[in-house]
Image: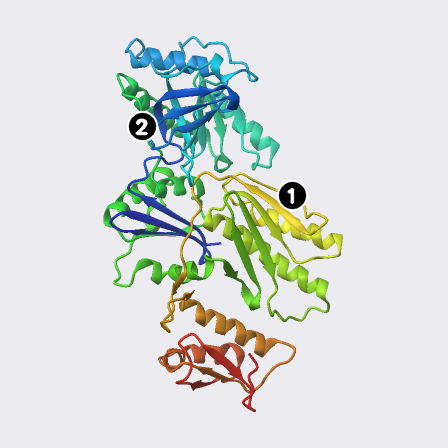
Amino acid sequence: MNRELIVRSSSDAVDFALLKDGKLTELHKEEDNNDFSVGDIFLAKVRKPVTGLNAAFVNVGYEKDAFLHYHDLGPQLSSMLKFIKKVSTGKLRDYSLKNFPFEKDIDKHGSINDVIKANQSLLVQIVKEPISTKGPRISSELSIAGRYLVMVPFSDRVSVSQKIGSNEEKDRLKRLVKSIKPKGFGVIIRTVAEGKKVAELDKDLENLLNKWSAMCKKLYRARTPSKVLVELNRASSILRDVFNDSFTGIHVDDETLYGQIQDYVQEIASGKESIVKLYSSSVPIFEKFGIERQIKTSFGRTASMSKGAYLIIEHTEALHVIDVNSGNRSNKAKNQEDTALEVNLLAASEIARQLRLRDMGGIIVVDFIDMVKAPHRRKLFDHLRDEMKDDRAKHKILPPSKFGLVQITRQRVRPEMNIKTTEENPNGNGKEVEAPIVLIDRINSDLERLLKGPAKDNSITLNIHPFIAAYLSKGFPSIRTKWFLEHKKWIKIQPRDAYTYLEYRFKNKDGKTIY
């Protein structure tokens, strides 16, 4: 499996596309004006506790106050407040916590008014970026993420990622981390730490402690609100979370970014920095790697799959509904049940990709094609779980209900990636149509159905607008030539002046329209 990261830079944003065997699986945008990214830590000021919500609204510098629930305060809130007060006034210069006297944990069923007051300063971390009309969601239970470890100040707990299957490996990692962990800090061992040696873990932990110390230095006489720790830029955070030996290339079209990413790769995987390449062709980088086409075909209300099957995706504020359609799909399956299973398995793979690609969060309800056999429903459920195991967002999948619906909850930490794929109709009627680039994909799909379906047509003529006819037949190898090599049939192309740009018809040898 090959993975590539494609980085496109512009004057006001940087786009990151993650490809898995050439297929777009994640798309991220980092804008210059995004001051409230997940992982950033702020010295903030409590605006007012709200007893009815058992929460507080906190000023972090955003136009709307951030929301802090009692359950997100963390058990060691009292110790943290005491630490902030001493450090900000200059009474404490040792940030290691090894000699810091901890306070008693707060009551997990307590009231917000018992622990924090209006105008009080506290450290908070962004856990959800501002979405729609809401301000950021925050937590005062801080965590600083590294490559292999996540460090949790004011804690002593060591835990291991559940994605590490071997109990022996879990025990080994726990023993190693406990032997190097400084007092006063908890550690979460990440999945990528599997198989790593103590020296690598120790180096990662040392980097996290340096980050903590640098952050604490900023607290002295700091104004509220102010950002005291900045999460890695999006490129580095993606590499930190997903980089592994299967990465075959990181392509960057900006020289400054190229240097930064190369340095970071050298830091986390020495010897692999040669896979970072500076892209300098005149062809835009996203076009070169086929990303623009995939964006056009993957976003929007309809998402196409192979052989005519497609998804319909509808959105509300916190709920997404996905409908699976077989379209005009034809195959060699003997009955409707086998066809339904094949389409549903295909759809499950595409849905897992769509959730990551669009960063859809909240509740997702999927209406798969009905299947009667219980083993088929189980196979679909297991396949969907396998396809989503690489998803870094926390998620939960419920088995198909009696109505054939599958419910998924997926963590939502930033606004959904939403890209407009419709364009102005070239026929000039003021309406919008799907992107013309999708037209060729639709023609390919229809042609495959006609040539491989049970009612095969041996003589097919494609009637289409002259501009599109020229695009299909000119050059070498032309698209028509590729059709011939794939299907072993020559498709006649008939330019039609009367057709609009996006109009086409397939006709048989008698001139009758067959699609």
Q: CA distance from mark 2 to mark 1?
A: 39 Å
Element class at badge 1: loop
Q: Is residue 130 left or right of residue 458?
A: left
Q: Which residue is rendered at x = 51% and y = 76% of the image?
A: 486
Instruction: Looking at the picture, tell me which residue is in the foreground, 99 or 509.
Output: 509
Tell me where residue 499 appears, x and y as whole percent.
42, 81
Seen in the picture, residue 368 relative to 45 is either above or below; the reply is below
N-terminal-most mark, 2 or 1 = 2
Identity of the residue drawn at 36% across and 42% down: 234
The x, y position of residue 507, in whole percent, is 53, 85
User: Which quadrant is home to the C terminus?
Assistant: bottom right
For mark 1, what is the residue? 398
Q: Mark 1 belongs to which amino acid?
A: Leu
| Residue that sits furthest to the right in the current view | 373
Mark 2 residue type? Lys
Question: Which residue is labeled 2 in the image?
Answer: 227
Q: Residues within 10 Å of mark 1 (few under 14, many from 20)?
A: few
Label 2 neighbour load within 10 Å: few <14, some 14-19, many 20+: many
Say above or below: 389 vs 373. Answer: above
- Tally the marks: 2
Rendered location of residue 402, percent (x, y): 73, 49
